[in-house]
Amino acid sequence: MQELTFVDMMLGSSLFIQFLMLCLLLGSIISWVSIFQRWQLFKQARTAHQEFRERFWSGMELSELFRTTDPHEAEGAERIVFSGYKTFNRIHKQTTDPATILEAVERSMRIAIAEEQDHLHDGLPLLATIGSVSPHIGLFGTVWGIIEAFRSLAVVKQATFAVVAPGMAEALITTALGLFVAIPAVVAYNRYLSSSELLLNHYENFADEFSGILHRSLVARKAD
């Protein structure tokens, strides 16, 4: 008897099972595209954060540091601190009260951090959805295939393992495909979620350090 290959079982399955396989294939393609895009985004975010941190602590004046900053191109800590610096300059012209100025600066930076969080988390819900739904689609296909296999046995006078095995193997294909799609998506989701939280912690620490610098500057001016 000719041995059934994986491709033969896929092509020989019912139209409904083939439809589920197509859905899983599309899910896998979308998942890998999203994984690659997230990898590029986090790589760029880490590089930008490190470069800005080095420039920030190089001793350069804040006015010089942000003189050529484009708010539309700035990202990460640079965008957060730049937002606070703009607010500082605007509020400082209206009042000299350190508490009022710092409250406005910190509120501006919190908003910027929330926007960065949305940017970093963009695409992660899609990976989570693919990772959680794919095994269920595969299991549904397996249950459907087993039902069809047992229905086909009703018209067979003698049911042997050789007769049952091909149908059962075809039924289990969707479960295997579901796991094949889900595992990379779940691993990538957890990895990128962890990277996102780490970067956000760095951003928050940077914002706190910047607030401390402004506070010391305001106290020194008030003392003078």
Image (cartoon, helix red, strand yellow):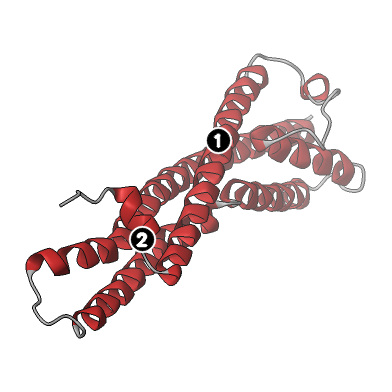
Tell me the CA gap for discs 1 and 2: 42 Å
**Residue type pointed to by label 2:** Gly
Out of 48 and 67, give the one closest to the viewer.
Answer: 48
Residue drawn at x 25%, y 83% as measured from the top left: 151
Which numbered tag is attached to residue 42? 1
Vertical arrangement, residue 111 with respect to residue 65, above or below: below
**Residue type pointed to by label 1:** Phe
User: Dot 1: what SS?
Assistant: helix
Vertical arrangement, residue 10 with respect to residue 94, above or below: below
Q: Position of residue 53 (x, y in %)?
A: 61, 24
Mark 1 or mark 2: whose residue is earlier in sequence: 2
Residue drawn at x 28%, y 62% as measured from the top left: 170
The quarter of the picture where residue 188 lies is: top left
Disc 2 packing (10 Å; few <14; some 14–19; many ≥20): some
Q: Is residue 211 left or right of residue 121?
A: right
Q: Position of residue 124 (x, y in %)?
A: 53, 53
Residue drawn at x 86%, y 42% as measured from the top left: 92
Which numbered tag is attached to residue 193? none
Out of 149 and 82, give the one closest to the viewer.
Answer: 149
Q: Is residue 14 left or right of residue 85?
A: left
Looking at the image, can residue 200 be seen? no
Q: Are marks 1 and 2 in contact (CB under 8 Å)?
A: no
Out of 210 and 139, give the one closest to the viewer.
Answer: 139
User: Dot 2: what SS?
Assistant: helix
Quarter of the image with the C terminus in it: top right
Q: Which residue is mark 2?
A: 12
Q: Residue furthest right?
A: 93
Out of 133 and 49, give the one closest to the viewer.
Answer: 133
The quarter of the picture where residue 169 lies is: bottom left
Residue drawn at x 64%, y 48% as measured from the top left: 119
Say which of marks 1 and 2 sits in front.
2
